[in-house]
């Protein structure tokens, strides 16, 4: 198969990281990693470890219809260079739900006075902000998570996900694809964008990768001819 599918369901913790490492050992060179998520959350540090692992592998993340991805799970979802959330407004169809709230501390300090708790929370927030920056996600997402109590969930709309930087394609990844393509064909990034736009408008026969929006995937003969300047 051209894709390696990894499914993460349920609570996210250190054991999830261990299982993911073992699973990825079976991934073949060149296989695209697609991570399917359905989780109520868990340990934010484990989630960020998973996210960094998946970002290094240029993974796609997805949340399927009728499932949820909350809090720590959302941090893993953010790691995808391409992110699929299958929302539909068709009556009777279950929609995807991606939600945020303030994460609970995984390790409660021995001293539980306000000063110790604040120090622990501040450190957790610092780690999440650093992670958000790595994933090209808005720092405002972390701010908004912090004001929502752990027992409450704020469900994100499509437009909210886009505003936070959790949209379909990571912008840095999209730019990297353009630059790599321009170098491959010996043209400027601007020329590559114009030819790619023309290919998507004119080519009737498309590949599986093109149909599913894999920016760095296999292109059709028609698209290749246009981008290379042969058509």
Image (spheres, rainbow, N blue to C red):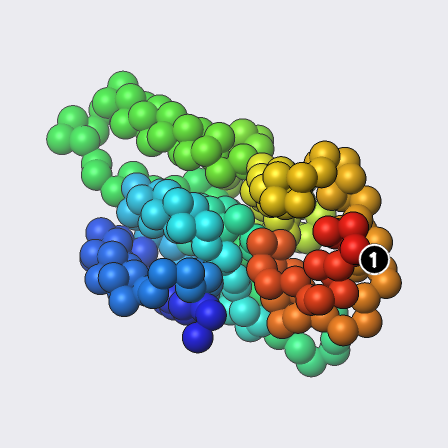
Q: Residue furthest front?
A: 230
**How many numbered marks are there?**
1
Q: Is residue 71 above or below residue 95?
A: above
What residue do we see at 34% from left, 47% from top?
53
Tell me the quarter of the picture where residue 118 sits.
top left
Quadrant in which the N terminus appears? bottom left
Asked whether residue 149 appears in the rendered view, the answer is no
Quadrant in which the C terminus appears? bottom right
Asked whether residue 32 appears in the rendered view, the answer is yes
Q: Is residue 203 left or right of residue 56?
A: right
Q: Is residue 171 left or right of residue 222?
A: left
x%, y% of residue 133? Answer: 48, 30
Q: Is residue 142 above or below residue 96?
A: above
Q: Residue furthest left?
A: 110
What residue do we see at 28% from left, 27% from top?
120
What residue do we see at 42% from left, 60% from top?
30
x%, y% of residue 218? Answer: 60, 63
x%, y% of residue 108? Answer: 21, 36
Q: Is residue 160 left or right of residue 69?
A: right
Front residue (pair 92, 3): 3
Front residue (pair 174, 193): 193
Tell me the quarter of the picture where residue 88 sits.
bottom right
Q: Is residue 134 left or right of residue 175?
A: left
Front residue (pair 12, 193): 193
Q: Which residue is mark 1?
A: 231
x%, y% of residue 151? Answer: 43, 50
Q: Residue furthest top?
A: 115
**Number of other residues with Cα within 10 Å of mark 1, as a class: few under 14, some 14 to 19, many 20 or more:** few
Front residue (pair 41, 58): 58
């Amino acid at each position: 198969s051209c894709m390696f599918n990894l499914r993460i369901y349920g609570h996210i913790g250190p054991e999830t990281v261990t299982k993911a490492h073992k699973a990825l050992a079976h991934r073949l060179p060149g296989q695209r990693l697609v991570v399917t998520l359905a989780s109520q959350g868990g340990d934010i540090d484990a989630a960020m470890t998973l996210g960094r692992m998946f970002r290094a592998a240029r993974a796609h993340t997805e949340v399927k219809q009728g499932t949820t991805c909350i809090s720590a799970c959302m941090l893993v979802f953010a790691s995808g260079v391409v992110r699929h959330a299958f929302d539909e407004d068709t009556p009777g169809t279950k929609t995807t739900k991606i939600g945020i709230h303030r994460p609970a501390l995984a390790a409660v300090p021995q001293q539980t006075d306000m000063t110790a708790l604040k120090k622990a929370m501040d450190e957790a927030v610092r780690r999440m902000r650093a992670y958000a920056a790595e994933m090209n996600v808005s720092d405002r997402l972390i701010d908004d998570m912090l004001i929502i109590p752990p027992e409450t969930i704020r469900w994100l709309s499509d437009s909210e996900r886009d505003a936070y930087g959790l949209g379909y394609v990571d912008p840095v990844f999209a730019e990297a694809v353009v630059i790599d393509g321009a170098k491959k064909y010996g043209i400027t990034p601007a020329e590559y964008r114009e030819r790619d736009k023309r290919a998507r408008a004119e080519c009737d026969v498309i590949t599986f990768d093109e149909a599913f929006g894999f920016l760095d995937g296999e292109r059709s003969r028609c698209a290749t001819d246009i981008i290379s300047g042969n058509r």
